[in-house]
Image: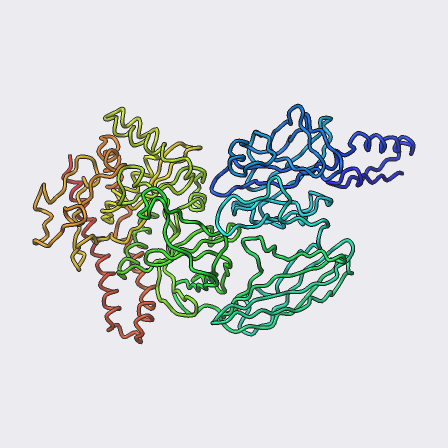
Amino acid sequence: MLKVDFWPFFPARRFTFMTTKFPAAICSLFLLTAAVALGADRDVIINEVMYHPPEQLEELQYIELFNRSSNSVSLENWAFTKGVRFTFPKGSNLGPGEFLVVTRNATALKKTYGAIPIVGDFSGKLSHKKDRLELVSSGKELVDWVEYQDHGEWPAAPDGYSSSLERISPSDPSELPENWASSRLPAFVSLGGTPGKRNDSFLPKLPPRVSHVVFSTHQPKPLERVRLSCEIAHPTGVKESVVFWNVFGGATVSTNSLPLKRVSGDERSGKYEVEIPGQNLGKLLRLVIKATGSEGEVRVSPNPFEPRPSFSLFYHTNRASTFVSQGILLQTGPTEERGSSGPGSRRSSSVQRREPVRGNGAFVYFSEKRQGWELFDHIRITPRKAGMKVRFLNDQKLNGMSTVNLVLEQAPRFLLAEHLAYEIYRLAGVPTPYSEHIRLNRNGREHGLYLLIEQPNRSFLTRNGRDDSGNLYKLLWYGNGVVEQHEKKTNTRLGHGDLVSLIEGLNSRNGAAQWDFIEKNFNVEECINYFVVNMCIQNWDGFFNNYFTYHDAGGSKKWEIYPWDEDKTWGDYDGASPSYDWYQLPLTYGMKGDRSPSRSSSLFNFGGRNQNGPFGEMGWWRPPGYFSGPLLANLEFRKRFLLRLKEFTEQSFTEQKVAPLIDSMEKRLLPEIQFKAGNRGDGRSQQVVEFKAHMESFRRQLVERRRFILSELRRMP
């Protein structure tokens, strides 16, 4: 039996051929033929891949080839046959030490990167999750291949964070995850990578591999020592291994290090351990491992080019006894600027907000439903109106959410009304942002009760079973016209064409033709449910603005509406009575043709109280919305809307189903109100009195608003 090792001829992978049939002379002839046929061809390698460009710039995907030999190689009729499809044209050559970039859109890539060697356009699209790329010669021999992933041992930064996937050592195999790293991560979201030049992560020889990093606990108690273990391997031996860590918390940041001790194996492949000293309560510890090979090759794990450039530990005890979740925010870097500059923004259109790539803090989440905590490190914390926005990394989201808002509005009632509003949308089956109340500590200081609200974005769409590749818009009350009032949140470079076309189509039709258009372009049931809940909770703002709309452009082709900014609901509006005793939002509200009550009737004067609002009418008046106006005025849509309103009011918006939600919220939050007020539960503090008054107003709203709706429905023909 003959064993033949093909390693010298196929540097991308090792083949072993075993046979008992062929004599040695034939096998020797086969080896010689293979060597002559391939020659320098084996030295053309896949050197870099941009598979997930930032900001949905999919046309800028690329694959870079590198000729590591000292000979020129003809690429004529070579091809990529898996992952994407591309055949190199006649006359294609790659000189010694040269690069060649194959891209999805050569014109766009040249505009972005300038004078680099580019060919294109390849067909197909590189997957953002995982893909296999195969480069074959004109004779269909496999020259090189890589099967990348967006998880496991593969780098995270190339997965939409601006970096590319770079080969570290051209002379080492492409199928090894440890031979791939991120290109340098820019400070702000922008197209990174190194097409047409030497990789940022280039090393002539592969450094040691660090794997299977394990901590004895991920939830250490104060002063508890934590054992770190890992495996480190290198073909010629590991010369040195050290763990470095920084401690955050308080006014200073300390830096420390300890050598790792090999506890099994040998210098080429062994298991290493070290015991990390305990830290005080509330301390955040960030660690990296540095492994050095016998010839000085260095690997730092995690890679400093990653969005999460360290392992992390947080020292705490289990959460306090509360009925709500708890959160700790730790600011470890500069505070981000607030705001955006999309269409409709109140910021100057000439000012572009630059999105940082690096995180500037950590978030520790204590769930009300379980013991222990979850640490989210290297996340972004951005100030926002009445609170802050927390953005998580792609590979560690909070219960599937990539971004949440921690909100503390100027009126305590808003924290109650908004969460309760979302509960009713969920009751009606409307895709709704997750929300919960949370006790927040920031940098060691208690801040009391906040409302955590999921941000509608791609993760929100995925969580709700929607295709996340469509167009998401946020409706604004300011701005002029369709485009300025719709802030686009996804596919921003594609503009507002689908939205403008939709609204023009709605307004250019009426009657049966308009209904056909509505059925074709809207998720009718979902939109009706949204408007039904608006009516029940008197969301006077949510017909005209303060919602998100989504177009599933590549799937169902239909539009939906998602609730947002529900603080002034349940009887509240601009200039509302302190008793929140307004129950009479008309069932015609929001539809095209509806008129301001201040002009049409004195029924809504409410004892002569001033009800003028920003539109010069009553505080709750808004003109019909871009969607609500034509939809609610269409006879067929309106008939279905009123039937669903009756059904929902009779069966779901009831004391039996909604009162328990109010009672549960009161039970959970009363201890938090007392905690913030600093009293001993005697119920006499002003905060407690106001809290209980708000809860009673919600109960009155449920009863009186329901009575009004059913009474109005009975009067209709």
User: At x 38% / y 65%, what residue is drawn?
Assistant: 439
Colour option used? rainbow
Q: Nearer the viewer, residue 357 or 74?
A: 74
Which quadrant does the C terminus fall into? top left
The quadrant in which residue 466 appears is top left
Point out residue 576 in the picture as x, y percentages from the top left corner.
Answer: 17, 55
Looking at the rendered structure, the number of numbered marks drawn on it comes to: 0
Q: Position of residue 322 (x, y in %)?
A: 39, 67
Q: Residue at x 59, y 43 (%)?
A: 194
Give the side of residue 634 with respect to residue 25, left or right.
left
Measured as percent of width and height from the top left, residue 406 is found at: 38, 58
Figure quadrant of residue 276: bottom right
- Residue visible at 50% across and 43% down? 54
Query: Along the horizontal axis of the image, is 708 left or right of 553?
Result: left
Residue at (31, 76) in percent of width and height: 680
Q: Nearer the viewer, residue 67 or 416?
A: 67
Percent from the top left, x then y, of residue 352?
39, 46
Residue 501 versus residue 538 in the image, above or below: above
Asked if residue 716 is positioned above or below residue 410 in the image, the reply reads above
